[in-house]
Amino acid sequence: MTPSEKEIKRFETLTQLPGISAHEMRVREYMKTQLSALSSELVFDGLGSIFAVKRSKKPNAPRVMMSGHMDEVGFVVKQITPKGLIKFHPIGRTWEHVVMAQRVKVYSSLTGQAYPGAVSSIPPHLLPEDSARRLLSLDQMLIDIGAESREDVLAAGIRPGDMIVVDGPFVPLLGGKKLLSKAWDNRFGCALALDVLEAVADQDLDVDLYIGATVQEESGLRGAKTSGYMIEPDISIVFESSAANDNMGDSEELGQQGKGVLLRYLDRTSITHRGLFMYATGLAEAKKIPFQYFMALGGTDSGEIHTARSGCPSMTVGVPSRYIHTNSSIMDYRDYVAAKDFALAFLRSLNHERYEKEILSYSR
C-alpha cells in the first residue's frame, strides 16, 4: 500500500511549507486555496485558524469540528553577533540532542526570502575534554548562514523574531509506504482534513461539519482555544501526528507503525470523553478499521477544545510518527489510510440520535 501521485504531491507540498507558530501564513494560504475549492463557506478565527463549513440538510444536526494544526516546531532569530552568526530561540518543544549540525532555513520577514544555514558551535577538537563531553544547550548554539558580519545579516533583511525552520526534504523510503520529511507534526493533520473534505464534498451528511486547521498548537494550543470558542462544536476530532514508540522492536509499546490509527484515551491536557471513546472504538471494530489504543505524555488541541464555552466531547485521532520534532520524521502511509477511513466512517455514521443516545448520554 503506497500513496498515489496526487497524495505524494500533497504530502510533499504541505511538509515542505515553512510555518512555525504565528508564522503559518504560507501553510494557511495553501489550505485556503484547497478548502475554498471544496466549500463555498470558510471561517477564520482572529489568530489565523481556518475552517471549511459543510452544512447538513437535517434539523438539529450535531456540529462536528475536525482539525489538524498548521504550525511546526522551529526557532526564531534572537540576536545577531558581530561576526554574523545568529542566536536563536526555540518555538515548541525541541530536544538539544537533535538540533546540533542540522541544516536550517532562515526566513526574512521583510522580503520572504529563505537563507540556508547550519546549526553550529565550537568544534570538540577546540574544547577541553570535559567540555566536549557535555551536551550543549540551545543558547550555546549558533546558526551560520555564511555571513561575515552583523551588517551582512541585516542587509539580507533578517531581523530578530524572524522564522527559522529545519531543512528536511520529503523522501519516500524503501518500499514506498514510509515517508520521510520534516513537519509531519502536524502537516499530517492538514493533509487528512483536505482528504476527508474532498471525500464527502458531494455527499449529504447528518452533521454540520467544520473542518480545517488551527494555528499555534506547538506554542500552547492557542488556535484551538480561539477556534473552539468560535465554532462551539458538539463534538471535536483532532487529527494529530504522535510519537511512535516502536523502533526498538517492543510490540507491547504504544504507537506501532503500520498497525493502524491511534485512538487516544488520555494525555497531559485531556481525558477523552468516555461516550465518544466508546463510540469511536466500537465503530472502528465494526468497520474493521485497524486501530490502536493510545495515551501520551504530551497534549494536543483537544486540551483546549474540550473545555471551550460549556465543553464538548473531544478526541485525538492520529498516526504514530517516528522522530517527530526533527528534520527527519517518518510516517507510515498505512496508518494514514486507517486514519482517513476512520474519519470518514465517523462522519457518515453520526447523526442527532446517535450523538444523543450513544455519546452525550455519558454526560447526562
Image: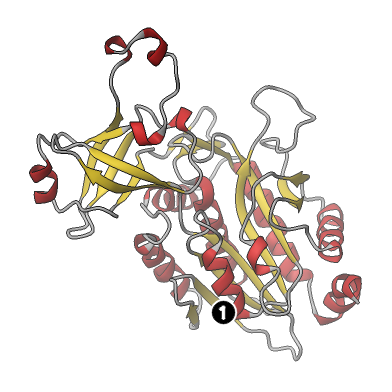
Quadrant of the frame with the N terminus = top right
Q: Which residue is mark 1?
A: 53
Asked if residue 299 lies left or right of residue 129, the reply is right
User: How was this image coloured?
Assistant: secondary structure
Residue type at mark 1 is Val
Q: Work out whether residue 340 or residue 357 is closer to the camera in this orientation and state it.
A: 357
Horizontal and vertical percent for residue 82?
A: 13, 38
Asked if residue 111 lies left or right of residue 119, the reply is left
Q: Work out whether residue 178 or residue 362 is closer to the camera in this orientation and state it.
A: 362
Q: Residue at horizontal 85%, vertical 70%?
A: 359
Quadrant of the frame with the C terminus = bottom right
Asked if residue 101 lies left or right of residue 31, the reply is left
Horizontal and vertical percent for residue 80?
A: 20, 43
The extreme bottom residue here reads: 59
Image mark count: 1
Horizontal and vertical percent for residue 24?
A: 39, 61
- Quadrant of the image occupied by residue 345: bottom right
Q: Residue at horizontal 69%, vertical 49%?
A: 338
Q: Work out whether residue 30 or residue 196 is closer to the camera in this orientation and state it.
A: 30
Task: Identify the element where label 1 is drawn.
Answer: strand
- Quadrant of the image occupied by residue 208: bottom right
Q: Residue at horizontal 39%, vertical 35%?
A: 138
